[in-house]
Amino acid sequence: MKLSFAPVDASDFEALFALRVAAMRPSLERLGIFNMNHARKRFLGQFEPQYMQHICVDEGAGEGPQRAGLLTLVPYDDGRLKLQHLYLLPAWHNRRIGDWALQHVQTQARLQGRAVWLEVLNQSDAIRFYERHGFVQTGGDPIDLLYQWTPA
């Protein structure tokens, strides 16, 4: 299995919105806060193709790379990077693709000497994933928890 990134452009909005809904809906429903209109509005406000990359998987079956996920890493004026999105379609879960993408983020942050922060839904399965990769909770509220990773 070969993993790669591909650029995002404005025409990818609908496909990436559908991916985000597929990835986030179970967690949002568990909290009782899923709303399709709110989800669309929120994603539209965060849609910045210049910081976004498709996560692509090529299994070598002659079909070429398939789009399996989304990674968005936004530089902030305070010197940190925000991991805005790291989503995989459910069919690609538990195949270490998220590990690969997050290691890429951490390598970039280390090279730039920047910390990485993110928000994760309270009660999300992603909490264990980020903690396993060295992210530490720094705050939060009943909906979102804040996490940060700082290069050694």
Image (spheres, rainbow, N blue to C red):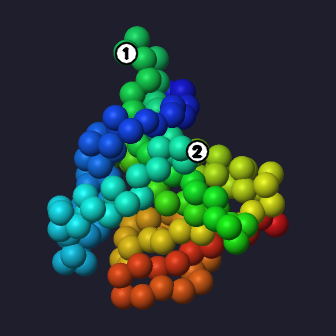
Q: Nearer the viewer, residue 6 or 94?
A: 6
Residue type marked 2 = Trp
Q: Residues within 10 Å of mark 1 (few under 14, many from 20)?
A: few
Residue type marked 1 = Glu
Residue 14 as seen in the image, left or right of residue 130: left
> Total label count?
2
Res 21 visible? yes
Q: Tell me which residue sits at (70%, 71%) in the image.
A: 78
Q: Report x, y in % for residue 123.
A: 36, 77
The secondary structure type at the circle numbered 1 is loop
Q: Tell me which residue sits at (17%, 62%) in the image.
A: 36
The quadrant the C terminus occupies is bottom right
Looking at the rendering, which quadrant does residue 2 occupy? top right
| Mark carried by residue 100 | 2
Q: Report x, y in % for residue 103.
A: 64, 50
Q: Tell me which residue sits at (79%, 55%) in the image.
A: 112
Q: Gap in Å between the C-alphas at discs 2 and 1?
A: 22 Å
Q: Nearer the viewer, residue 88 or 10?
A: 10
Pick whichever of labels 2 and 1 is earlier in the sequence: 1
Return the residue at label 1: 63
Q: Eyeballing the image, is 65 above or below 127?
A: above
Q: Nearer the viewer, residue 12 or 145?
A: 12
